Amino acid sequence: MKEHSSNNSPNQKKAPCPKKVPIFQSLSNEEIMKIARMTRHIQYRKGQMLLNEGEKSDKLFIVNYGQVKVSKFTMDGKEQILYLLTSGDFFGELHLFNPNETHNFSVYALEDTEICLITKEAMDRIMEDNSGISIKLLTTVTQRLAHTENLAQNLATKNPDVRIAYMILEFCQKFGKPNKEGVLIELPISREEVASYVGVTRETISRKFSKFEKLGFISLCGNKQLLVKNQKALRRYIQ
């Protein structure tokens, strides 16, 4: 991939990629820089594919800056978004343990994004030197499995109100910025993609957002921003 300019702040770019990743946070600065020297940086334009379902890979992919979506396509060609990842998040961890397996998802850049790559060989050395990283890596794997199970359960058994409330709360945690009125979310995906994330139509998303707005739970700020005013009320929906 070619180098390109980005709107991300210079300070965001300057921080060593591994320093942003929770599994490496117990390491010293010297160890962080050692890992940083093992990484290769690749830049992607908005909309570009990072990984295609069915590919093999023996690398850990770390989002240095930008945002990506991890998704699968159903037999009838509909997209199901599994995860939304941002700076400090990573994917491809399962293939560090079994590089012969193919990826069962595709990954696309939601905006101009830089990825740091660490090979399986380098990660093996890192985990040998720091056993705690292996445990944290496995913890992340189990958390993602739980997320996928919750997503499947929500899609199978919960009504649209519950699915959308669950998504808004998740976005509060991952993308929200608190202010005096509540939590402002800069939506990382389009309304169509929001619909595919929760398994409903775009029209249903619009209706439910309007319903939550009338109830005073949220306030819509155009198509890309959402102000969450009452998280407690949304939590009651998912209980």
Image (cartoon, grey):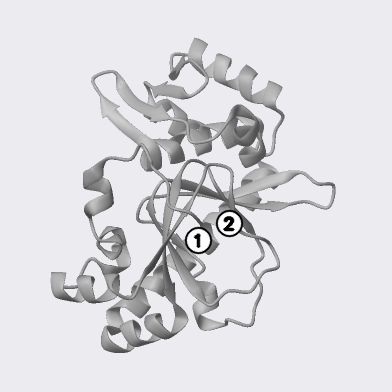
Which of 155 and 21 lies nearest the eye of the viewer? 21
Q: Furthest-left residue in view?
A: 29
**Quick check: 88 left or right of 91?**
left
Q: Picture coordinates of residue 66 (x, y %)? A: 41, 46
User: Within 10 Å of the Cα at label 2, are there few (<14), some (14-19), or many (20+) other Cα atoms?
Assistant: some
Q: Furthest-top residue in view?
A: 214
Residue type, mark 2 in image: Thr
Q: Which residue is mark 2?
A: 148
Q: Are marks 1 and 2 in contact (CB under 8 Å)?
A: yes
For image coordinates 36% across by 79% down, the residue present is: 134
For image coordinates 55% across by 76% down, the residue present is: 95
Distance from label 1 to label 2 (Cα)?
6 Å
Q: Picture coordinates of residue 163 (x, y %)? A: 59, 36
Which of 129 and 220 lies nearest the eye of the viewer? 129
Q: Is residue 79 above or below residue 94?
A: above
Give the secondary structure at mark 2.
helix
Q: Picture coordinates of residue 172 (x, y %)? A: 39, 35
Q: Which residue is mark 1?
A: 144
